[in-house]
Image (cartoon, grey):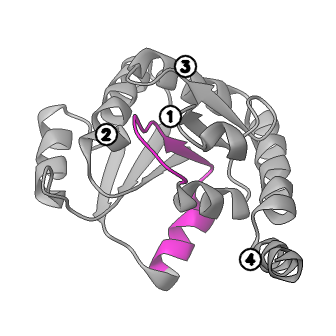
């Protein structure tokens, strides 16, 4: 069974409903998957509200709502899943994507804000159209159907994260900036 992870605060602009719509599409196509929803409540949505939405959509067999996870619990779920979905409409520089890349997960995301600077489309992840559940579902289906390709993309993403976005790289860059100042 292929496992996806959505990890973000429960905000509409993070694409939570697009993710649920995509899960409905995949379920209707009879695909074997689980989508884990991890995140804390927001002013818009509560964990209970998302759980109710999952039940109303008859997705309880394919969607697991965990609420917020921190520390070892968050690390554990990042190690258990096969791919990371992040269909956000509005971002700045999402560290959660870097966390997923660090764990070797292929990323399925929108190409908003800094995400094209982080993810290389079809090399370290896949870009989907914002607010488009069909586009997200198709990308999710592609990784389910081609798990070897997804693993290779996840490994390239892990290498990219280590090369450009690791703490060591950040410290090296900051030191160089300070030396040159």
Q: Which residue is label 2 attached to?
A: 13
Mark 3 lies on a secondary structure that is helix
* Residue 173 horizontal/vertical position (percent): 83, 72
- N-terminal-most mark, 1 or 2: 2
- N-terminal-most mark, 2 or 4: 2
Characterize the local packing of mark 2: few (<14), some (14-19) or many (20 or more) Cα atoms within 10 angstroms. some
Look at the image and give the residue range highlighted in magenta. Answer: 73-93
Would you place residue 155 above or below residue 117 in this image? below
Q: Which residue is label 3 attached to?
A: 138
Judging depth in this view, the residue of 103 and 63 nearest the camera is 103
Residue at image x 70%, y 47%? 118
Q: Are marks 4 and 3 in contact (CB under 8 Å)?
A: no
Q: Which residue is label 4 attached to?
A: 167
- N-terminal-most mark, 4 or 1: 1
Q: Are marks 4 and 1 in contact (CB under 8 Å)?
A: no
* Residue 114 horizontal/vertical position (percent): 60, 44
Residue at image x 63%, y 32%? 144
What distance separates the C-alpha of mark 1 from that of mark 3? Answer: 14 Å
Judging depth in this view, the residue of 122 and 27 nearest the camera is 122
- N-terminal-most mark, 2 or 3: 2
Characterize the local packing of mark 3: few (<14), some (14-19) or many (20 or more) Cα atoms within 10 angstroms. some
Q: Are marks 2 and 4 in contact (CB under 8 Å)?
A: no
């Amino acid at each position: 069974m292929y496992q996806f992870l959505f990890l973000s605060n429960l905000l509409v602009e993070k694409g939570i409903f697009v993710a649920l719509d995509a899960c409905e599409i995949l379920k209707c196509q009879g695909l074997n998957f689980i989508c884990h929803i991890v995140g804390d409540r927001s002013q818009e949505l509560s964990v209970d509200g998302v759980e109710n939405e999952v039940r109303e959509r008859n997705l309880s067999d394919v969607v697991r709502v965990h609420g917020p996870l921190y520390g070892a619990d968050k690390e554990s779920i990042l190690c258990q899943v096969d791919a990371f979905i992040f269909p956000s409409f509005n971002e700045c520089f999402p560290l959660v994507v870097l966390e997923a890349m660090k764990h070797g997960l292929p990323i399925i995301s929108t190409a908003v804000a800094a995400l094209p600077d982080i993810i290389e489309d079809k090399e370290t992840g896949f870009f989907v159209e914002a607010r488009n559940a069909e586009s997200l579902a198709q990308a999710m289906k592609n990784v389910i159907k081609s798990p070897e390709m997804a693993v290779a993309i996840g490994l390239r993403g892990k290498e990219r994260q280590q090369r450009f976005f690791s703490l060591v790289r950040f410290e090296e860059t900051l030191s160089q900036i300070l030396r040159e100042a």
